[in-house]
Image: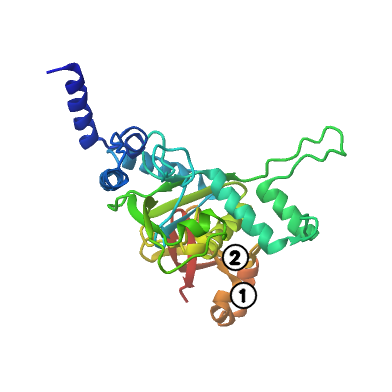
Amino acid sequence: MTELQMRRDAYQVAYETCQHAGLLLERGFKTWHSENTKHADAKNKFYAQLTRQQPGNAYPLAFERWLAILQDAGETSKTWVGDIDGRLYLGLGEANPLESAVTLHHTYGVPFIPGSAVKGVLRQAYLADYADVNEKTGNSSMATDARETFHILFGREADTDKRGDSGDAGYLVYNDAWWIPQGKKPLVEEVVTVHHAEYYVSQGQIAATDFDSPNPNPQIAIQGSFLFSLEGAEDWADFAIGLLAQTLANRGLGAKTASGYGFFRPSKSLIQETLEWPAAIIGSYTRAGLGRVIEAVCQGKRATCKYEELNSFIASLSKADKKRLQSNTLKKTVKVKANGNRYQLIQIVP
């Protein structure tokens, strides 16, 4: 057996047994044909092999360790679990031997969402909701309160008019979002079909007609669920994670959101059954960005809901219990739901 044949045999074994999708995507495609039809067929087979990849045994252990770290951080760490509503494109334009790329963890070879991307999409959503943009200059302006909140969440640039001002990085840490290993394979084949290639390449100079041949392009997308987390002062972290949940549900993340990719919905994968906390301490508070809320604390865990969600229950309280609620000393059994390490107060048992 020649050395070249030995290399080919070794490559074939590695190709068939590789559990690292990133390594396979970067180094695994070896077939290039001058004939486009043969090349396309080889590429389709390669994508099929890539999407059959399951994470290695180390990744679930790493994920459990990360989840434990977030839970140990207590109230300074806020999490939200989201299911991809369809498919997610992430890192589509990254350098890659093929036309389609995807953002994968360097160590584990599974999809992840960089913390910078999480912060960026949240920042963009905040500006869209709270900033007024001058169409002529492109400059944006915000009300004083909104600007101060923006600086806390995302930081501010250095003021060149003030000597020694180096800016501010903001008061929250946006962690990478981890893909949740729960049976589903992380990668899935997707096809984007260009129907009028010459029209797009010529920027409209060549007319699109019904006689144009469609050109299907195989690509790699992400499916499943992600654990999002951020850290900081409790009130601000709670406000930011709630804003992030709204942003991912309404605006999406990643590429091709205009075509319906990249949207999330609250996940049921890590949401527990309704829990009952006996003898919880309940109070009424005003929280930054949330307004008036009801909070229940039991064994160091905190559950929250908006004040108006429990209006009917509050109205039924005795005068003495209403005073206890206002002084944050009301003691009752409550029912809560958990999403990651966040707890939602859903009922106060009479």
Instruction: Name the quadrant of the N terminus.
Output: top left
Is residue 57 left or right of 284 when viewed as pictured? left
Side of 231 where 265 appears, left or right: left
254 or 177: nearer the viewer: 254
Amino acid type at circle 1 is: Lys
Is 286 displayed left or right of 58 in the figure? right
Q: Which residue is mark 1?
A: 322
SS at circle 2: strand
Q: Choose the circle earlier in sequence order: 2 or 1.
A: 2
| Corner quadrant of residue 305 | bottom right
| Residue at point 52%, 57% (across, down) | 200
> Which residue is disc 2 drawn over?
283
**CA distance for labels 2 and 1:** 10 Å
| Picture quadrant of residue 21 | top left
Residue 116 visible in rendering: yes
Residue lying at 24% horizontally and 34% vertically, measured from the top left = 15
On the rendered structure, is 343 left or right of 324? Answer: left
Judging depth in this view, the residue of 304 and 320 nearest the camera is 304
Q: Nearer the viewer, residue 42 or 128?
A: 42
Q: Is residue 111 depicted above or below 298 in this figure? A: above
Residue 297 visible? The answer is no
